[in-house]
Amino acid sequence: MERLDKILAMQGSSSRKDVKEMIRKGRVAVNGTVVKESSLKIGEEDSVTLDGVHLSLKKHIYLMLNKPQGVVSASDSDSDTTVVDLVPDEFYRSGLFPAGRLDKDTVGFVLITDDGDFAHRILSPKNHIVKTYEAKLAAPLSNEDRLMLQNGITLSDGTTLKEAKVEISEDGDTPTVKIQICEGKYHQIKRMFAAAGNKVIYLKRTAMGGLRLDPSLPEGKCREISPEELLKIESGKFFSDFEQ
Ligand code: URA
């Protein structure tokens, strides 16, 4: 149990002094009743609203965003809409950042959190958490090139890319491929296929570890990730055969 003013100051970007003022003005309700005492002790099970908007009282928050094209994977930007700008008020708190970046034109699963330790664990290549992507290519992919990319390659600038899994899910002149990688180097997937003389014309991240992007989540929307789902992310350490 913590003081109401302390908990509210931890959630948002307001100072403790501003929070006390909000409470004094009757803008805060606990379990449906307006409270005016900043020192009231509350716990995670209590429901707290500010101006009628529900606030999450958890120590950390973990959100799944279905990122649209044109949005940058950053916490703030002077010129572009960021993934954090898409977080609705009910989930917003200070310190949110994307755990891993997608390019501006890449769509799909971005995890937004304020938990730096968790982000480090799922992003560190040492932990082998697999990220799954779906890509559309500009030209057919030969089996030879597919196997070359799977085995890991060294790019012309000397960057080495570890082994990956590459599977053609729809063959043809502009095939759709599924890719799994355990590292997140700059433009990694686009550079992989460029090294094979091909070009990625559409890219979507469909899973992080063992957690798939929720198919019912519309582009531009986010939802909370449950504790069970967080475990699924951390347990996704092996390339799968894409049977999901
Ligand atoms: N690889 C890329 O090239 N771009 C992304 O956004 C993610 C992985």
Image (spheres, rainbow, N blue to C red):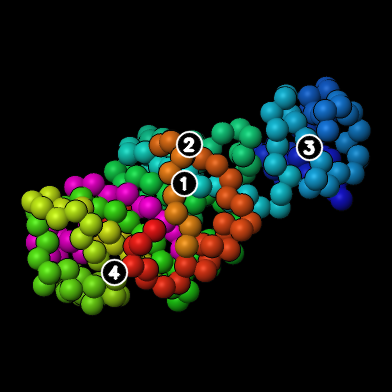
- Ligand 1 within 8 angstroms of badge 2 C-beta: no
Task: Return the mark for residue 214.
Answer: 1
Residue at left offset 91%, top offset 40%:
39
Observer-nearest residue: 227 or 73?
227
Observer-nearest residue: 7 or 198?
198
Q: Which residue is mark 4?
A: 165
Q: Which residue is mark 2?
A: 221
Residue 205 in percent (x, y) is at 36, 52
Q: CA distance from mark 4 to mark 3?
A: 45 Å
Residue 130 falls in image quadrant:
bottom left
N-terminal-most mark, 4 or 2: 4
N-terminal-most mark, 1 or 2: 1
Observer-nearest residue: 47 or 191?
47
Q: Tell whether 2 sits left or right of 200.
A: right
Tell me the crowding category of disc 1: few under 14, some 14 to 19, or many 20 or more residues within 10 angstroms, Cα based: some
Residue type indicated by callout 1: Asp
Q: CA distance from mark 3 to mark 1?
A: 26 Å
Residue type indicated by callout 4: Lys
Q: Secondary structure at mark 1?
A: loop
The quarter in which the C terminus is drawn is: bottom left
N-terminal-most mark, 4 or 3: 3
